[in-house]
């Protein structure tokens, strides 16, 4: 072999060995890298791969349904289609949203909400764009799916209130979560279209009604399309609730109140069941399910009769003459009032240099307790109150439940205000004067009571002195106190109430009824509206007719029936209704009559069923 | 050049009988090649979601066709390749020019030449043609020749012209492969190391100039390689998902056809450039190492065949082809492991693709041809008696 060949061949061998060494080095790097990725980082990448392929979607639990005492459905769920946006699946969510708007217009407020949700929701969580899609809209969205990346159409349940305004203030309503719901658990934010109870029982019993969301773990491909279902956790439906409300009575109460602003509550005096809980004017709670338009909202807000305000729950009124029942009872219990002793009413009582007038300027003449209640004579109670003293009146009022919460099932129940000398000293820095006692004796002055407190007190008077727990939910056990008062004393008070309706001189005589011998007993009240000057200033100059309505007296009537075996108690408040006897008593009369009529009807029906 | 002159040189001597050729054929080498191809078809079957279509079946057909080409090429006379090396190179260069003029756009780049029946990718063929031409060029050169600067200018031009054409297509990966394989051959035949360093320094200095001429997507790829988190859902997506796919395999892997990343299309081009990640996901580190070992065995056999060959043309040809193969493996693996920018180099024998498979098998056919003709005497100019 020639030299050059030998040299060259040797060089090639040397260089090949060098190159092999380089290859070995490269191999070490590559294998090291593989070891790093697959072993050292393997777990991390495994998790990332799992994350890649799985999507967890929460599924909506069915909200508990709500029925009335006879099984009539008051709050139902029905199926709807909704369009949701999943941000991470959208190529450009703004573009998607714009394309969506071209197909289905969105309200300006809605769009703002969507953009807000896009900002604070996690990228893989669905955001509701539009619910209640019609079939045509669903088809339209499906056809345009290519330009709507990230949009998905899903079936969901939505609340409906078939009885509309009849139940608005009992059930309240539900609406979508917003960014002010900071105390709501984040899991609910991850459910597109979840609606939370905002008022009424929907709000108060939210935790029982909402149920537990389920989940669907699905495998998705790189395009975000679901490939298969991997794991599913079924949602747990919320609890169905049976209320004590009788929707028929509820309807009658609404009708009886008519166009007035007011409230009517009917309870069973033996069981504490609330059969009717009405606040007028009412509204259709269905309109809050989807976002409400500004126009509708303004209309509701500007209505001076305040349809959104739950007067049955939040209303606090001077009880007026109804409180005379409490004072009379306090007098009897303390032995100050002798039921047969007459007191002379000249039309006014002189206290120092102050004169306290009776509502009847010419005076009632001389009256017994029963007659004083019948006529609602102020002077009788002025005189008696001075002898009974504020402490005994307050004590009796407290026993009857004034100044405290009545229902636990509904959030927002007020305490009202039962004034005491200590309270006055604490808040007004002033001594309790006899004048305050006189004002208290006719249910005016500082005293504020809620309709629920009043109806419970009436129930206690009617059921021989048991202070009973009022409730909205059907329950087997009745919680009430032992009799708190001497039954003879209660009979005297009830006799007065009987006369108010059934004596020809009674203040509510015109509202009497006789349904197979079943009668009503009650007490009227007409209370002056305390006008707050600050409010006046805020609202500016008003039209004359509004001024007149606003300054009219509140009309109240508390009653129970039947008189021989009391079963139902009712409180009716007609705001600015004028007189208790003319505005409130007829309403209460209609309601109680209906309650008694329904009892008879139901009994007949039951009899018919058992006979069959 | 003298290759026109002695037309009859290969006729004179050394005509092996078919039996001799058959026994000279390196069957072990072919066995390991086929083993890798079978693994590749298995992975393609998995990628297809447990289906022969669309990839596994076609790849099988291509494998059979390519195998025929390998056998035919292997049983050719080695002198024939020596003789026609420049012709083959020249023809391929013409085809590259043809792509420039008639080529139609495929995958966003102008790479394919439609020859009526088949779509040919001349840039793929150039990889072999260039090695043939360089082997021929360096065959008769002495070490002194090779160490002269002037001597390496023609082969640099042989490389430079096609590289420029391929860069124009644009196909950064193939151009890079040509540069690397030329450099490797230069190194193997004994070009001094300082010259490489000089070119390296000059090249580094030219980076800004090259950068200015890169296409946007190429720039993106380089930038993304340097910082994958720059754009996790855009260009960096490939690298990130590739690493996730690899890493999630762990030691044992997720099992055959159980790779979620590939099945659910989280890795792009899973059947071509990123096929290794599919294997790594389903068979873990174990499977990856087995495959890697097979590749190293093939490279080892290639080198041994080259070193056993007594003529320089065969030596250089076999070495060049083997190094070319090794570069494919290293660059693809480095790419999918996130050690290199994504340049579009397939994993040889595994990736789905017709031209690549065919070119590789023709290359292996040439190596087998070298193995068969290891004792052939080839004169400086291609004949036996021109020394």
Image: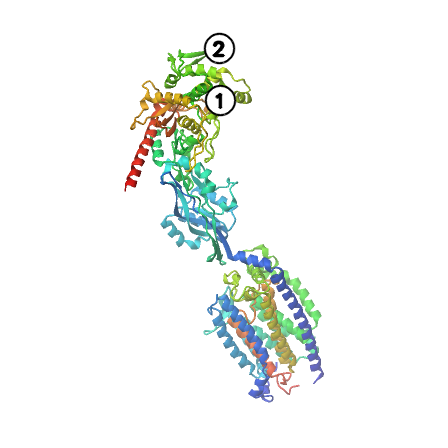
Q: Position of residue B331 (x, y in %)?
A: 60, 67
Which one is closest to the eye, mark 1 or mark 2?
Answer: 1
Tag 2 subunit = A
**Residue A403, labelled with which disc?**
none
Tag 1 subunit = A
Q: Is residue A579 left or right of residue A20?
A: left
Residue B67 visible to an observer of this rendering:
yes
Q: Is residue A268 above or below residue A444?
A: below
Q: Is residue A461 left or right of residue B168?
A: left
Residue A444 visible to an observer of this rendering:
no
Q: Position of residue B223 (x, y in %)?
A: 60, 58
Q: Are marks 1 and 2 in contact (CB under 8 Å)?
A: no
Q: Is residue A548 above or below residue B324?
A: above
Q: Nearer the viewer, residue A264 or B319?
A: A264
Report the number of numbered marks.
2
Q: From mark 1 to mark 2, how far is it between C-alphas?
A: 23 Å
- Applied colour scheme: rainbow
Q: Is residue B134 above or below residue B171?
A: below
Q: Quadrant of the N terminus of chain A?
A: bottom right
Q: Nearer the viewer, residue A452 or B89?
A: A452
Q: Which residue bears the numbered disc 1?
A: A394
In the image, are marks 1 and 2 on the same chain?
yes
Q: Position of residue A180 (x, y in %)?
A: 51, 39
Q: Is residue B373 above or below residue B344?
A: below
Q: Which residue bears the numbered disc 2?
A: A352
Callout 1 environment at 10 Å: few (<14), some (14 to 19), or many (20+)?
A: many
Q: Position of residue B335 (x, y in %)?
A: 59, 64
Q: Quadrant of residue B76?
A: bottom right
Q: Quadrant of the C terminus of chain A?
A: top left
Q: Secondary structure at mark 1?
A: helix
**Between discs 1 and 2, the one toward the N terminus:** 2
């Amino acid at each position: 072999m020639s030299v050059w060949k030998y040299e060259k061949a040797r060089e090639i061998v040397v260089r090949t060995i060098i190159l092999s060494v380089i290859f070995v080095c490269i191999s070490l790097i590559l294998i090291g890298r593989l070891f790093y990725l697959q072993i050292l980082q393997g777990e991390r990448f495994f998790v990332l791969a799992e994350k890649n392929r799985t999507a967890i979607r929460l599924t909506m639990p069915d909200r508990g349904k709500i029925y009335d005492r006879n099984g009539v459905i008051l709050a139902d769920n029905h199926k709807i289609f909704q369009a949701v946006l999943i941000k991470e699946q959208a190529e450009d969510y703004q573009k998607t949203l714009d394309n969506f708007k071209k197909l289905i217009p969105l309200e300006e407020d809605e769009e703002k909400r969507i953009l807000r949700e896009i900002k604070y929701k996690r990228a893989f969580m669905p955001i509701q764009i539009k619910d209640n899609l019609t079939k045509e809209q669903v088809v339209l969205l499906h056809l345009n799916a290519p330009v709507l990346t990230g949009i998905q159409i899903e079936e969901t349940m939505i609340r409906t209130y078939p009885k509309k305004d009849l139940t608005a203030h009992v059930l309240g309503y539900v609406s979508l979560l917003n960014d002010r719901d900071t105390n709501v658990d984040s899991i609910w934010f991850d459910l597109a279209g979840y609606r939370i109870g905002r008022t009424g029982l929907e709000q108060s019993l939210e935790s029982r009604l909402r149920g537990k969301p389920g989940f669907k773990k699905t495998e998705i491909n790189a395009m975000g399309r679901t490939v298969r279902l991997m794991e599913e956790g079924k949602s747990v439906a919320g609890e169905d609730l049976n209320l004590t409300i009788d929707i028929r009575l509820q309807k009658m109460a609404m009708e009886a109140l008519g166009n007035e602003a007011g409230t009517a509550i009917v309870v069973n005096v033996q069981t504490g069941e609330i059969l009717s809980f009405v606040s007028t004017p009412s509204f259709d709670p269905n309109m809050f399910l989807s976002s409400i338009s500004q126009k509708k909202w303004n209309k509701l807000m500007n209505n001076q009769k305040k349809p959104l305000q739950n007067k049955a729950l939040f209303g606090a009124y001077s009880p007026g003459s109804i409180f005379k029942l409490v004072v009379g009872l306090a007098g009897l219990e303390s032995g100050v009032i002798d039921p047969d002793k007459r007191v002379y009413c000249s039309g006014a009582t002189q206290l120092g240099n102050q004169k306290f007038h009776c509502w009847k300027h010419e005076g009632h003449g001389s009256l017994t307790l029963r007659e004083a209640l019948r006529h609602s004579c102020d002077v009788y109670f002025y005189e008696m109150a001075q002898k009974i003293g504020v402490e005994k009146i307050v004590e009796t009022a407290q026993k009857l439940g004034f100044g405290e919460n009545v229902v636990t099932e509904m959030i927002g129940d007020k305490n009202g205000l039962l004034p005491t000398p200590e309270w006055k000293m604490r808040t007004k820095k002033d001594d309790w004067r006899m004048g305050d006692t006189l004002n208290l004796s006719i249910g005016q002055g500082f005293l504020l009571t809620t309709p629920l407190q009043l109806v419970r007190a009436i129930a206690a008077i009617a059921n021989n002195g048991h202070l009973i727990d009022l409730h909205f939910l059907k329950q087997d056990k009745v919680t009430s106190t032992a009799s708190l008062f001497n039954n003879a004393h209660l009979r005297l008070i009830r006799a007065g109430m009987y006369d108010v309706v059934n004596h020809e001189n009674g203040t509510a005589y015109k509202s009497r009824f006789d349904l197979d011998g079943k009668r009503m007993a009650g007490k009227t009240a007409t209370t002056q509206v305390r006008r707050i000057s600050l409010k006046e200033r805020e609202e500016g100059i008003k039209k004359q007719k509004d001024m007149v309505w606003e300054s009219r007296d509140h009309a109240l009537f508390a009653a129970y029936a039947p008189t021989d075996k009391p079963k139902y108690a009712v409180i009716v408040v007609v705001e600015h209704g004028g007189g208790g006897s003319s505005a409130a008593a007829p309403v209460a009369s209609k309601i109680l009559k209906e309650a008694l009529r329904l009892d008879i009807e139901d009994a007949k029906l039951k009899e018919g069923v058992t006979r069959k | 050049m003298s290759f026109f002159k002695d037309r009859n040189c290969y006729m004179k001597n050394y005509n092996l009988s078919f039996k001799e050729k058959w026994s000279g054929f390196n069957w072990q080498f072919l066995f390991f090649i086929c083993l890798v191809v079978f693994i590749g078809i298995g992975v393609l079957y998995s990628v297809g979601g447990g289906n022969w279509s669309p990839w596994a079946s076609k790849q099988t057909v291509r494998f059979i066709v390519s195998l025929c080409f390998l056998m035919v090429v292997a049983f050719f006379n080695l002198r024939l390749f020596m003789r026609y090396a420049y012709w083959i190179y020249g023809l391929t260069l013409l085809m590259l020019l043809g792509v420039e003029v008639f080529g139609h756009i495929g995958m966003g780049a102008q790479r394919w030449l439609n020859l009526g029946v088949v779509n040919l990718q001349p840039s793929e063929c150039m990889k072999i043609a260039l090695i043939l031409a360089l082997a021929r060029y360096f065959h008769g050169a002495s070490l002194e020749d090779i160490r002269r600067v002037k001597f390496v200018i023609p082969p640099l031009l042989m490389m430079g012209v096609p590289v420029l054409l391929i860069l124009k297509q644009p196909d950064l990966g193939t151009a890079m492969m040509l540069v690397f394989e030329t450099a490797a051959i230069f190194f193997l035949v004994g070009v001094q190391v300082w010259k490489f360093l000089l070119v390296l320094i000059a090249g580094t200095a030219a980076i800004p100039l090259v950068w200015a001429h890169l296409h946007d997507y190429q720039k993106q790829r380089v930038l993304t390689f340097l910082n994958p988190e720059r754009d996790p859902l855009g260009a960096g997506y490939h690298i990130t998902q590739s690493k996730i796919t690899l890493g999630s395999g762990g030691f044992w892997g997720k099992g055959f056809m159980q790779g979620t990343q590939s099945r659910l299309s989280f890795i792009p081009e899973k059947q071509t450039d990123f096929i290794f990640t599919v294997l790594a996901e389903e068979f873990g580190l174990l499977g990856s190492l087995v495959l890697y070992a097979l590749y190293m065995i093939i490279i080892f056999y290639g080198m041994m065949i080259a070193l056993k060959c007594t003529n320089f043309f065969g030596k250089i040809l076999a070495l060049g082809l083997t190094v070319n193969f090794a570069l494919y493996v290293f660059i693809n693996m480095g790419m999918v492991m996130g050690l290199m920018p994504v340049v579009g180099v397939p994993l040889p024998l595994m990736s789905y693709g017709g031209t690549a498979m065919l070119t590789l098998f023709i290359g292996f056919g040439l190596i087998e041809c070298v193995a068969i003709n290891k004792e052939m005497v080839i004169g400086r100019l291609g004949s036996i008696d021109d020394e």
